[in-house]
Amino acid sequence: MTEEWIMNWTNSIHPDRQAKMRRARELFSQMVEEGYSAVEASEMLVGKGVADVPMADELISESVGMVAAGETRRIPRHYSDIRGRIEKLALSLPSSEFLQIITGDGHNRFAIGRLSKREASDLDALLRLARTQRGRDPRVIESIHSSIESHVQNAMLDTEMMAGEEMSIDWSEDGMTALATDDIGTHRVSLKDDSCTCDRYILGGFRHLGLMCEHIVAANKASAGDDWDEMSGVRKVFSQSSNDGTRSAWCDRLRREIDISASCMDSECPFFGGDGEDFIRCGFASG
């Protein structure tokens, strides 16, 4: 109560602070929507002089409060979910730093992409050209996306598969921090900024691209409960039965009708979210 009174008193003395806070809150929201974590967004705003440290702390507290209140967040599950963030990184970072995010040092088994020397060289040239042109040529930007999209999408697919494997989640008292234990070890997950201490998240470039590792996904799924479908973009796909008893449904990923038993269940499709009487739950987002 005292802190709130002091904040209100400060705002009344410095009305320009209210205007600055409104601007910071607007930019903060935009950055979070683009995939930056609350901590990353606040640090960047402080670094650019848009907000001071008390403002940044307030923005993070507001963000945590919205999560605790059950505000729906979306889990990035498709390349299109982070496409905008990748473009911003490609145009703002030196080509060597962007390549480091995607490929690591060449010996990093957690790297998102395994590019050949020729592929890395071609991507480096595209990144340099894009920065020189300041992103004005959409063909160059599209070529950058084409160079890395399959690698990023495969990393996201791997996350879906590993998040479904056996893993225990132990929560802290505030319900925003968890210890996720798998067959490799125990990792600390924070739902405040969707971060994890595992090597895949830290060394694999996931945190820079706004990707979630399997531990973050598993913790979010456990925390969301009934809201998981909305958070992860899972939707109902209606099915139909044939005379021989097989059931089929349209698959956006394969772009054709599929046998649900063979293509979803037997193949253990990572996007398969469950079977209803006349529908299935699918987590694949086309586009």
Image (cartoon, rainbow, N blue to C red):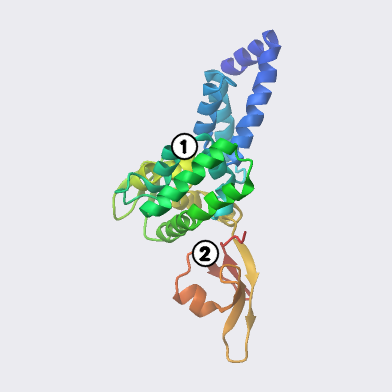
Is 149 in front, or is 68? 149
> Looking at the image, which residue is at 47% across and 45% down?
125
Left or right: residue 131 compared with residue 238: left
- According to the picture, the residue beneath numbered tag 1 turns out to be 174
Cα gap from disc 1 to disc 2, whole angstroms: 30 Å
Instruction: Answer with left or right where residue 186 lies relative to residue 51.
Output: left
Classify 10 Å Cα crowding around label 1: few (below 14), some (14-19), many (20 and above). Answer: few
Quarter that holds the N terminus? top right
Residue that label 2 marks: 271
Q: Nearer the viewer, residue 115 or 187?
A: 115
Residue type (three-letter) at the residue carrying disc 1? Asp
Residue 58 appears anywhere in the view: yes
Q: Which amino acid lies under the numbered mark 2 shown in the image of this protein?
A: Phe
Secondary element type, mark 1 = loop
- Nearer to us in this view, 124 or 47: 124
Is 4 above or below relative to 152? above
Compared with 243, 123 (above or below) is: above
Instruction: Look at the numbered disc 2 and give the secondary structure of its residue.
Output: loop
Classed neighbour count for the residue bearing mark 2: other residues with Cα under 10 Å, few (<14), some (14–19), many (≥20) = some
Find residue 183 and report its horizontal and vertical position in percent: 29, 55
| Residue furthest bottom in the image | 244
Residue 15 x, y percent position in the rendering: 70, 12
Residue 213 visible somewhere in the drawing: no
* Residue contact between numbered discs 1 and 2, judged by CB atoms under 8 Å: no
